[in-house]
Image: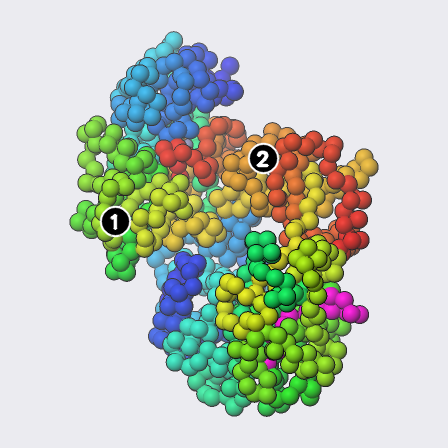
Amino acid sequence: MALLEFNENGIFCPPASVYIDPWRPVRNALITHGHADHSRRGHQHYLCTESAAPVIRYRLGEDISLETIKYGEPRVINGVRFSFHPAGHILGSAQIRVEYKGEIWVVSGDYKLENDGISEAFEPVRCHTFISECTFGLPVYNWPDQHDVYADIVRWWKRNREEGKTSVITAYALGKAQRLLRNLPENEGPVFTHGAVENVNEVIRRQGIQLPDTIRVTPEQDRKAYQGALVIATPSALGSPWMKKFRPYSTAMASGWMAIRGTRRRRSADRGFVLSDHADWGGLNQAIEQTGAEKIFVTHGYTSIYGNWLKDQGYDAREVKTDFSGESDDADSTGGDA
Amino acid sequence: MKQFTKLFSELDGTTKTNPKVDALSDYFDKAPEYDKLWTIALLSHRRPKRAVNATRMKEWAAEIAGLPFWLVDESHHVVGDLAETIALILPDHENESSESLTHWMEFIIGLRNLEENERKSEMARAWSMLSRQQRFVFNKLITGGFRMGVSQKLMVRALAAATGIEENLLAHRLMGDWTPASTTFEELVLSEDKDEKDSRPYPFYLAYPLEQPPGELGTPAEWQAEMKWDGIRGQIIVRNQQLFVWSRGEELVTDKYPEYEVLTGFLPDGTVLDGEIMPFRDGLPLPFTLLQKRIGRKKVGPSLLKKVPVIFMAYDLLESGGEDIRQLPLNERRKKLEMVVAEAPEILRLSETVSFDTWEELADVRSDARSRQTEGIMLKNQASAYRVGRKRGDWWKWKVDPLTIDAVMIYAMRGHGRRANLYTDYTFAVRDGENLVPFAKAYSGLTDKEIARVDRFVKQNTLERFGPVRSVRPELVFEIAFEGINKSSRHKSGVALRFPRISRWREDKPASEINTLDDLHRMMDLYG
Ligand SMILES: [Zn+2]
Ligand SMILES: [Zn+2]
């Protein structure tokens, strides 16, 4: 029997009888992070990191049975030793290490290697078997330096302001939105937020994380205030009537998918900035190498291509079908991320 | 290359016309003359011949990047563009080339005369000198498909803004057989051409689609009806014994339709006709797809002239005896037009009016429009002047409804880019006895939610996999809409559809009730 197996409910650990990021309701769920495709509704008991908990409670209800754990703190269940380690994906995100009778597996959840200034920075964890996401598992995905990207965003914002336009940038409400806030200069001008973004901001501020001031977009707001300002919106707001009040405006998307010209052109935004909370090609390869694992399971993303590449590199690699929707186009506002 | 790459990025970064024109005219303002000339050449389809084979390029790039060929190939499939794929996978570095566009164009032309192994090392050298974005542009210059979303017209507009020379004069100057080696910017663009004023066209008046019932337009007597022809909108101009042909998009295409030249002797000086360039034989229109073969060619050879003969279907007269008559009411212009056409050879035809006393009568003609190789009916107000651009009120196009057929999905293919893991492109089949015969591919028409559901079905009902394609259990039924149907020997079904798309998902219909190959062939007999 394998230490972790994949069944119709999710990633299952038979000796401990718990699931990791299950997609169907189960008794015990260990959760890597707060995105909707990883922390789903309906489980009886949840376990996640302290910093991931507030958003999960906010999304799933204050009344869920949820326990928290510190990074690195061991939790033994039926002789199986579990611990959570920073994944660098969003605030509170974790890789879950599972150890039993000397055998070690790690479930990566979603991760990235660069330190984004708000997520707990990624730490490689040695293991025998690594279950890795590979959302961007193609050699064409190589992220530019994030500081260059922030500088580009500011340049775009400035130029819009000179032209009397509002700058509307879309970002996932949980993760990317706060990353932008933390990394854009504070004295550049007012920043407005879509309600879904501001709700998450409030949760995150309450847990003691510093974010620059933002103003919630409301129907009462005087439209003149938007001129020259930055608006952080959810991807679904783009092209909706909600946008009317910002006219004239320029739109941009911040996502790893923007690395490909065809994708940029198909999107309805004026600009695409390459900024991802997932590992790029180099990041995936580096992370996998650093685990020292010989056996790799690849989940959401270009699993078959990336799996074949790993096999070429001498790994025992397998492709796993999961219900994580990392590549989904129309995830809800706190959901599938890129 | 820096300036040109910046231009490329700016053009590429927007879909809006004005920023494109601004970026271009800014470029034409600042770039050196020899680079401007190359830019004009590239934007008017005067690219040098392909110097490097695409597969070789992929192999060399894979080798430099230390990646297996199959992986680069898979990446190419996802990205959908070879030039970009190569630019993205090559190792990143800090270099950037300050050499001119002209330098790199000459470098590319020079590649053609090299041995394969020299070519390989030259390519590697170039890639090592260029920044990532420059490499993309450089690769694009080699592989082609270099559109940048800039039509000739847009380029001309920008050039006009930068030089202060009128657009249609410039369009005229840029015509003909020149290469950057055979001329200079000064000679080509800035010097006056003796007959350029004669070539000047009028802006086209464009019709609106009719969405209301035609009865709301008033009484039939106020309206002139014609068939809506399926060709390319064009203007034929004869002034000072010279003929010019303009197509919509205001491109000068005289060279592409040499058969119109005979009209010079028949049309009086100072004549401008509005109409449709159409493939035509034995008194009947040929399928529009044939004309597309001519559109892409810079030069039209004798065999193509024979295979795809054209006529000009005239429906309006804009200038008569050198006088602009666009303000005359349509019925008066029409009388003059009829006189002009009557004197001309066969190649010039009159778009006949359809007489009708009631709107019902006209609706009958419309329902039959497809079998006459037309797209529907045009309605023009008898008293109207010839207006400029797309204006509501006087000209309406009343198109026929699309043809539809119910079919079952049998193959699905992964999309590109962001949708690379979703099955978004489908092949459909009709029934032929016991067999299913594929007859159409369609990509669009479903909502994102429906695509996600179809994708799930595909993944759960796969029969076989061939690379990015899967064959699936033939269960999902869709209504396929299309604009036309023609005989085709290249397809197993024997038919080719024009603009097929999914009009709706027939979840109410089992696969046993789809249409048959006979149904398709019957449609072809009626409308093909
Ligand atoms: Zn995530
Ligand atoms: Zn995910």
Q: Which of the 4 image quarters holds residue A91?
A: top left
Label 2 C-beta lies within 8 Å of the nearest ligand 2 atom? no
Q: Say which residue label 1 marks.
A: A223
Q: Residue B137 at x, y = what percent? A: 45, 62
Q: Residue A160 at x, y = what percent? A: 29, 57
> What secondary structure is the magenta-colored segment mainly?
strand
Q: Say which residue label 2 marks.
A: B454
* Label 2 Cα neighbours within 10 Å, binned few <14 / some 14-19 / many ≥20: many
Q: Residue A246 at x, y = what percent? A: 30, 50
Q: Secondary structure at mark 1?
A: helix
Query: For the magenta stretch, what is the residue range?
Result: B272-285
Q: Which of the 4 image quarters holds residue A157?
A: bottom left
Residue B471 visible, this orientation: no
Contact flag, marks 1 and 2 (Cβ < 8 Å): no
**Chain for numbered disc 2:** B
- Do the residues at discs 1 and 2 belong to one chain? no
Q: Nearer the viewer, residue A275 or B300?
A: B300
Q: Based on the picture, tell me whether residue B10 belongs to the magenta stretch.
A: no
Q: Nearer the viewer, residue B109 or A146?
A: A146
* Label 1 Cα neighbours within 10 Å, binned few <14 / some 14-19 / many ≥20: few
Residue at coordinates 47% horizontally, 88% vertically from top-left?
Answer: B192
